[in-house]
Amino acid sequence: MQREAAEIRAEWLGHLLSTAPADRPAAEAAISELYRLIGFEPPRFHWVASPIAALETVPPGLRLRAAETADRLAEWPLPLHFRRQISELTTRLDVTAVRDHPALDRLMGQLVRAPIAASGNGTLAMVLGSGSGSARFRRNGPWYSALCASWSAHYAALRTSGVEYAREQNRMLDLWATPVRSCGWWWPREHVCVVSERPVEIHTEVWGDEGQVRLHRPDGPALRFADGWDVHAWHGTKVPSWVIDDPDVERIARETNIEVRRCAIEKIGWGDYIDRAGLRLVATAPDPGNPGSELRLYDLRERTRVLLAVNGSTERDGHRRRYGLTVPGAFDDPVAAAGWTYGLSGDQYSRLVRRT
């Protein structure tokens, strides 16, 4: 069953990460039927090249009311109707799945639903955080959760594994799954539905035990849409383009975001960064929590030092990553500094069998 779950997860991750042009007829037919089911006439469709374009432009011929702007999406009436529809559907599906197949439901939740949800948050959801003004939004907002492939994948996986739903439940599940398989996100107003094309380029890495993926690319944008909107990412962290394209010591020194600064240093490499920045070596010591490796303590800036260590476990490529941790400037002993990062004293850390 775990192999079957992995195959189902791979199929739905393929839909989530697809860069193929949208199947517009399929998406429009499914969304039109969903409109009818909540009592509205099928809308006029306005297709855009990216989610940002959907949030930053007004469809031709549409005069927006104050409550219809992108930053007030939670107040739009149709998303509320659709979310209620999903809630009613999943409640009925859960009656069958949880009651009759509790172990299978838990397994698919762990191996399909959770990894796809995490992968959605670690990939496509990042692009909307790149907007400005009214285009900025809460990535975990209720409408975006409704559009996430994870819940459709979960119930489809149960069905593939033998759970039987009622005919109307199958029809509803297929209607909601069709846009996931056919296009990007969509934003429903009463008379107009704005639908985004998929990205034209996406680069990811596997980072979890259950096949989760996140954006990562060391030599360009990790996510790009046809209209030029893109996202640069370093091991799942969204970063300014300079971190990937042109990291340097001066920019790192000016950067106020700790995570962005860390990514830029990792892009350069901690060893090269220390040399370029001219950091003063304070002390070195064998790492008792990671036999065969060395701890190195450097001055970083006023009242701050950086501890350079080697990861206790190997990465997926077989290498052990060197990384730096900022510690208070009062530390002169690398072992004590390493213990501090774990909430331990230096003596406690030195007695560890092995750090992981």
Image (cartoon, rainbow, N blue to C red):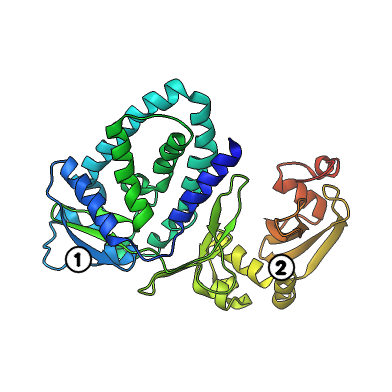
Tell me the quadrant of the picture where the N terminus can be found: top right
Residue plotted at (76% across, 51% down): 313
From this viewpoint, which residue is outermost toward the top?
99
- Disc marking residue 119: none
Q: Can residue 93 be seen in this view?
A: yes
The CA span between labels 2 and 1 is: 46 Å
Secondary structure beneath label 1: loop
Q: Residues within 10 Å of mark 2 (few under 14, many from 20)?
A: some
State left or right for residue 85 relative to residue 137.
Answer: left
Q: Nearer the viewer, residue 132 or 245?
A: 245
- Tell me: residue 334, above or below residue 52: above
Q: Nearer the viewer, residue 144 or 49?
A: 49
- Tell me: residue 299, above or below residue 163: below
- Tell me: residue 305, above or below residue 163: below
Q: According to the image, label 1 marks what residue?
A: 58
- Percent across and percent down for residue 88 are 28, 32
Three-letter amino acid code at disc 2? Trp
Q: How crowded is mark 1: few (under 14 residues within 10 Å), some or many (20 or more)?
A: some
* Residue 71 quadrant: bottom left
Which numbered disc, 2 or 1, marks the residue closer to the eye?
A: 1
Q: Can residue 134 be seen in this view?
A: no
For the residues labelled 2 and 1, say whether their Cβ atoms are less than 8 Å apart.
no
Q: Nearer the viewer, residue 56 or 22?
A: 22
Q: According to the image, label 2 marks what residue?
A: 270
Residue plotted at (29% across, 45% down): 175
State left or right for residue 164 relative to residue 251.
Answer: left
